[in-house]
């Protein structure tokens, strides 16, 4: 077996007459007049390679095992294909079956499986069209994100996953403790009530955001970004929330709210533009299968300027809209997804950047405006999904930040190092957080965030 074997993706580019081997999993097999037509995929591209097996070329025993889900290698010759939609196919001369898949039991049969069912067999769903495309796009998007920042001199940093600080100051964290053990009856047992006796010597949690640590690195490296897992113990089951999700968090010194907005817009446009150029086959599948106007809206995002308005202007528009919203709108309320969708879908028809939110509904670290009521926050809202990016200019003045931490009812002590940034060489700085899975929902049109991550973590589910 040659580890440098040719991907199916590249087999399509070989000239007729070339001897080749194709490795992969059987999607379907159809027999007609003594010829078997096998659709083979190795996940390297959306398209399956058609393999033609003439009667008698492979043993009857082997042929019996070539069923949906089986893993095989075909050796043969690339020939011109008479079938529509493909220039070439492989005329088989030999086959090796690596792993059969009993057709009576294989859970991923051909048609009509619901997304919910496929979630239960998440270890196999990647072999189908939809999830093959989702995870290829996920990988391409990750690459595009790294490339965007790398090309602009940002340093990729890795903040800790276990932390003693609550970045959002909002609770909803998973505790990390060795004081809690499973006993031999599989019951929880507390070995100590004392956080000081715990592994880290104080209460520790899975991070909800790497932002605070990213700020420390930005005030030294100037432009940095994180790209890693974050965790929120939000006990709500929505189609937009995961307990474990991946976040991209750039942090920029010498940057204020305007630069932050411009950077966020440029970022979304470049990443989406990259996917339009490089994930064409996969996006062509999502459009229209999963989302009818997907390509049109994505191109529109790349080509048109994002609308910018203040929270106060948005509330006025919502109040004047005459719409019956489930949650009432008034100045000071946090906007709900239905409000965000009305603004982006009905009112503006493209992404909207909202700024200057009431300080009470945003995190403690955001820079206060001179009105004393609002902060320099910015949320990027996208049609179909609402908030996709949340960001702000950070408060860089020590006295104001100390007051705000106290106003939020948070203790000062754990933030000593964060406050040090304002004590020594403070600088105006800003940044934002993009939920990677929210972006993937947007670009694929997938309706549930559980279906754009290989294994979703949500209330009641940690399978796989
Ligand atoms: P939401 O109001 O949608 O819950 P948030 O205000 O809690 O979002 P932030 O704390 O600003 O979100 O987090 C930054 C980004 O991370 C959001 O813009 C969103 O894209 C993403 N995000 C937040 N919470 C989740 C979650 N539970 N699952 C997936 N992505 C999330
Ligand atoms: Mn939230």
Image (tube, rainbow, N blue to C red):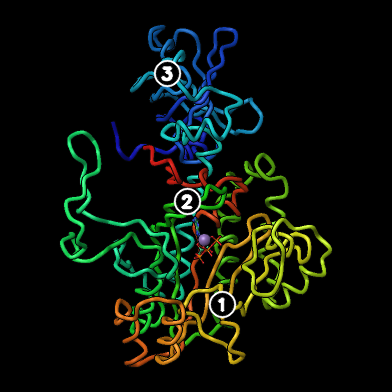
Task: Indicate the quadrant where residue 339 lies.
Answer: bottom right
Mark whose residue sits in front, 3 or 2: 2
Residue 287 appears in which quarter of the rendering?
Answer: top right
249 up-or-down from 272: above or below: below
- Image marks 3 and 1: residues in contact by CB distance under 8 Å: no
Q: Locate residue 98, reporting x and y percent.
A: 33, 23
Residue at the image point whose x is 52% and y is 30% from the top: 117
Looking at the image, do the residues carrying marks 1 and 2 touch, with CB atoms under 8 Å apart?
no
Q: Nearer the viewer, mark 3 or mark 1?
A: 1
Residue 399, position as x, y percentages in the image: 41, 92
Q: Which mark is residue 377?
A: 1
Q: CA distance from mark 3 to mark 2?
A: 56 Å
Q: Are marks 3 and 2 in contact (CB under 8 Å)?
A: no
Give the position of the N terminus as an image quadrant: top left
Q: Position of residue 94 (x, y in %)?
A: 39, 18
Q: Residue at x 51, y 36 (%)?
A: 15
Residue 186 lies, with reference to residue 378, above or below; the image says: above
Task: Quickly name the residue at label 3.
Answer: 93
Gap in angstroms between the C-alphas marked 3 and 1 = 64 Å
Along the polypeptide, which appears first: circle 3 or circle 1?
A: 3
Disc 1 element: strand
How busy is the neighbourhood of tag 2: few (under 14 within 10 Å), some, or many (20 plus)? few
Q: Earlier in the sequence, mark 3 or mark 2?
A: 3
Q: In this view of the protein, which residue sits in the foreground, 167 or 295?
A: 167
In the picture of the structure, the residue carrying the numbered disc 2 is 235
Label located before the other in sequence (1 or 2): 2
Find residue 198 and report its horizontal and vertical position in percent. 18, 60
Q: Is residue 21 left or right of residue 299?
A: left
Q: Which quadrant of the view contains residue 372?
A: bottom right
């Amino acid at each position: 077996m040659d580890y440098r074997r040719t991907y199916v993706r590249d087999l399509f580019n070989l000239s007729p007459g070339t001897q080749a081997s194709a490795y992969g999993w059987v999607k379907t097999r159809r027999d007609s007049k003594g010829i078997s037509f096998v659709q083979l995929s190795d996940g390297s591209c959306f398209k399956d390679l058609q393999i033609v097996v003439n009667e008698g070329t492979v043993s009857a025993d082997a042929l019996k095992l070539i069923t949906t889900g089986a893993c095989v290698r075909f050796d043969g010759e690339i020939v011109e294909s008479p079938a529509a939609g493909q220039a070439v196919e492989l005329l088989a001369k030999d086959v090796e079956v690596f792993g059969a898949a009993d057709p009576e039991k294989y859970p991923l049969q051909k048609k009509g499986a619901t997304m919910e069912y496929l979630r239960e067999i998440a270890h196999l769903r990647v072999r189908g069209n939809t999830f093959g495309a989702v995870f290829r796009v996920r990988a391409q998007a990750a690459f595009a994100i790294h490339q965007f920042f790398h090309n602009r001199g940002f340093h990729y940093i890795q903040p800790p996953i276990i932390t003693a600080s609550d970045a959002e100051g909002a609770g909803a964290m998973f505790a990390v403790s060795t004081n809690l053990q499973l006993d031999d009856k599989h019951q929880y047992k507390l070995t100590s009530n004392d956080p000081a006796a715990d592994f880290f010597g104080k209460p520790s949690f899975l991070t909800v955001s790497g932002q605070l640590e990213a700020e420390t690195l930005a005030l030294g490296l100037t432009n940095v970004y994180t790209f890693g897992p974050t965790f929120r113990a939000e006990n709500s089951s929505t189609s937009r929330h995961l307990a474990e999700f991946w976040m991209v968090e750039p942090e920029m010194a010498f940057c204020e709210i305007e630069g932050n907005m411009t950077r966020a817009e440029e970022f979304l446009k470049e990443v989406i533009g990259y996917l339009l150029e490089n994930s064409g086959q996969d996006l062509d599948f999502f459009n229209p299968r999963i989302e009818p106007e997907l390509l049109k809206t994505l191109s529109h995002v790349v080509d048109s300027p994002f609308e910018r308005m203040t929270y106060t202007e948005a509330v006025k528009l919502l109040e004047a809209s005459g719409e019956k919203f489930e949650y009432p709108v008034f100045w000071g309320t946090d906007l709900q997804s239905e409000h965000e969708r009305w603004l982006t879908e009905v009112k503006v028809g493209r992404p909207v950047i909202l700024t200057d939110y009431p300080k009470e509904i945003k995190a403690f670290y955001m820079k206060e405006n001179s009105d004393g009521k609002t902060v320099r926050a910015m949320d990027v809202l996208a049609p179909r999904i609402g908030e996709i990016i949340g960001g702000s200019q950070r408060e860089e003045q020590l006295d104001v930040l100390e007051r705000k931490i106290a106003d939020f009812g948070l203790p000062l002590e754990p933030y000593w190092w964060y406050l040090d940034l304002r004590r020594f060489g403070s600088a105006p700085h800003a940044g934002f957080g993009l939920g990677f899975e929210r972006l993937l929902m947007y670009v694929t049109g997938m309706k549930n965030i559980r279906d754009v991550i290989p294994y979703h973590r949500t209330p009641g589910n940690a399978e796989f």
